[in-house]
Amino acid sequence: MHSSQVGSIHVGVGPVSFEDLVRVARDGAPVELTGEALEAIDRAREVVEALAAAKTPTYGVSTGFGALATRHIPTKMRAQLQRSLVRSHAAGSGPEVEREVVRALMLLRLSTLATGRTGVRRETAQLMAGLLTHGITPVVREHGSLGCSGDLAPLSHCALALMGEGEVRDASGTLLPAAEALAAAGLEPVELVAKEGLALINGTDGMLGMLVLAITDLRMLLRTADVAAAMSVEGQLGTDRVFAPELQAIRPHPGQALSAANLTALMADSAVVASHRTGDCNRVQDAYSLRCSPQVHGAARDTVEHAALVAGRELASAVDNPVVLGDAVESNGNFHGAPVGYVLDFLAIVAADVASMSERRTDRFLDTSRNHGLPPFLADDPGVDSGLMIAQYTQASIVSELKRLAVPASVDSIPSSAMQEDHVSMGWNAARKLRRSVDGLARVVAVEVMTAARALDLRAPLTPSPATGAVVDLLRSSGVAGPGPDRHLSPEIEAVVGLVQSGAVLAAAASVIGELQ
């Protein structure tokens, strides 16, 4: 969506909401600073200007930075100090970071500027809002942040654009010099003055933006994993009795109860389930990957909500160093990314484990010793046809990578800045790998949905539940055909991945039973 299609997001002295961040990052919503925020910015600027005029040096206002903090910088060199800071710190390398990530980190830096704790001028903050509103996205590189002193390199690439330097992409995605993009939008670059350079780059905004986007995606994907699990339990002639609320209540984890309730609702009124709910059913217990789905999906959900709690605290923070406090500017350590880095790593564990369980459920469909009467690999003519054999290989390949991505980044500190910055969070790295993990989880769940849909078709004339049947119908109407001779599978897998990532699979089930919990 273009900014003209959505209302402006107002950035005030309080925190940005998850929903507003997603609207700015993904939907291109324009941004405005509130009157209260502008007043807070002006008050803090007065404090900084008074300290800048004083004879006694103040860190970040009239001194160098990091290990060079002991040098007092004379007034006439301070504009050069800001330029040098931003240019030297814009030292990223590698592929461009995604547009949504850059927009998220710019919005969150603007949110901190709006608290009146940083000392920037209002025109500098307004230019940041202007870039977001006009869809001008600075080029930020993959590598460069240690997640301590904040995401210095990524934020410096954004600050560089405010100075009219470096490269950006305009609203259409065209790469051009920042000065040209600003001029085309009718925006004037700023010459940064005392304290502003530091205020623009000293935050956890990149890792936090990626955390909020990942939480948003995982909340949807974990409910979609419930849909996939219900289809698998149903298609493998499993029982829904283990998901009964009275059995969940004796182990009162909230996420588990929600997931189990979803599975019960999703499988309601299934002729496939009813067909083996008889006295002569010889199944004693289903495999763990079926029976324990709510325990794993629920623990994942509880972990995501813990991460959301941490993200909410960070959204309510003013992360800068030094920070304006009353009539003083004080050094602090609030830029350390540990709180955010830890939960980013925790969510990579969640993504890997939920995907691992999904792959195990898929594999059971393909093995005649475990799939209860279905053809080998769900193939049309086994031996001539391979069916979905290699789709499971694709899952296995992704799950293997997800396990590697679950190794924490936040325990791997490397000292920097001549040992001044001797312990860092690596939160940016944790966020970058989590984005890959979330994408991998969606792909694994998509293959399970595709496999389970084929299995449910093969159970005919027995019919699936109305909710899972709606998902099968969605696939069939989206170019993903049912059972039959082998055909090119990759386009069908990609189509289902799109249906999972867009929320369409979840919406199809919800259209029958209401919103999943």
Image (tube, rainbow, N blue to C red):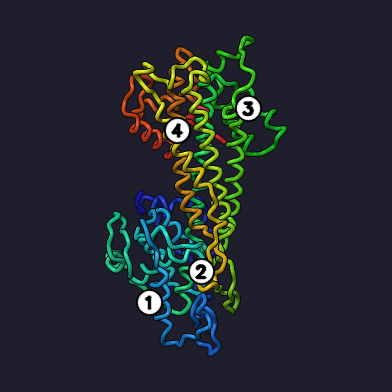
- Give the distance between the C-alpha atoms of the residues marked 1 and 2, in whole angstroms: 29 Å
Q: Given the current orientation, which residue lies at the most extreme top position?
A: 280
Q: Nearer the viewer, residue 55 or 436?
A: 436
* Corner quadrant of residue 489: top left
Q: Residues within 10 Å of mark 4 (few under 14, many from 20)?
A: many
Instruction: Name the image quarter holding the C terminus.
Output: top right
Q: Which residue appears at 42% of the width and 70% of the height? A: 89
In the figure, residue 338 lies in which quadrant? bottom right
Q: Residue at x 44, y 30 (%)?
A: 392
Closer to the N terminus: mark 3 or mark 4? 3
Between 43 and 249, the one lying in front of the other is: 249
Mark number, residue 243 = 3
How far, Cα to Cα, is label 3 from label 4? 21 Å
Task: State the mark number for residue 505.
Answer: 4
Estimate the x, y position of residue 5 in percent, counting from the top left. Answer: 36, 50
Q: CA distance from mark 1 to mark 4?
A: 50 Å
